[in-house]
Image: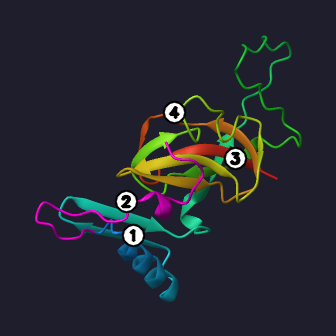
Amino acid sequence: MPSSRAAVETAPATTTSETGAETLLDIEKIRELVDMMMANDLVEISLRDGDTEINLRRPGASGGVAPVFAAQPPVAASAPAVAAGAAPPVEEASGEDEIEFIEVTSPMVGTFYASPEPGTPSFVEVGGNITAETVVCIVEAMKVFNEIKAEVSGVVEKILVKNESPVEYGQPLFLIRPH
């Protein structure tokens, strides 16, 4: 897996089809698509050329986060001990029955990676503080590794996907308790 470089930099310089024609993965064509997105104020673009498909999404687009509400379970008077590695129960601070979480969703179909390389620590852990610019994971699509930013500040409450699992477009990846 690549390091924390931008997805465009990790794409092959030129990819040719069986007929020798250049495909959508040509780095200059990708840059042209990004320029077109910026010029026309587009948030996302998806193109297909034969078997090749490319999905581009601008950073900071609101499509990656969606509010979610979860009911707070009642806290028992004598709660059992929490198993090692498990998240402790969330204590209710204000007496409301619901806590608002923000979902960080996958902007594309691909494979979820929790860390930049195998054997290295995860980008985020449950209970960790994050900012909108924090990289929370990588989603690999067509051999391009895309860093996914949180786009919201808060505390990671739950990681919803296991490392190296396939993910769908719009699938929730994390639950964040906003600051």
Instruction: Say the numbered circle drawn on residue 163.
Output: 4
- Kind of element beneath mark 2: loop
Q: Position of residue 17 (x, y in %)?
A: 18, 62
Where residue 94 sits: x, y (%)?
A: 89, 43
Q: Which of labels 4 and 1 is toward the front?
A: 1
Mark 4–mark 1 Cα distance, whole angstroms, equals 28 Å
Residue position marked by numbered label 3 in the rendering? 176
The disc label shown at residue 104, or none:
none
Residue drawn at x 79%, y 32% is 90
Disc 4/disc 3 C-alpha distance (Å): 18 Å
Q: Amino acid at mark 3?
A: Ile
Q: Where are the magenta residues, as a range?
A: 1-23
Q: Are marks 4 and 2 in contact (CB under 8 Å)?
A: no
Mark 4 or mark 1: whose residue is earlier in sequence: 1
Secondary element at image label 1: helix
Helix, strand or loop at label 4? It is: loop
Alpha carbon separation for disc pair 3 and 1: 34 Å
Residues tagged 4 and 1 counted as in contact (Cβ below 8 A)? no
> What is the number of the mark on residue 27?
1
How far apart marks 4 and 2 lie (CA) works out to 25 Å
Q: Residue at coordinates 47% horizontally, 64% vertically from top-left?
A: 8
Q: Are marks 4 and 3 in contact (CB under 8 Å)?
A: no
Please indicate, yes or no, whether residue 168 appears anywhere in the rendered image: no
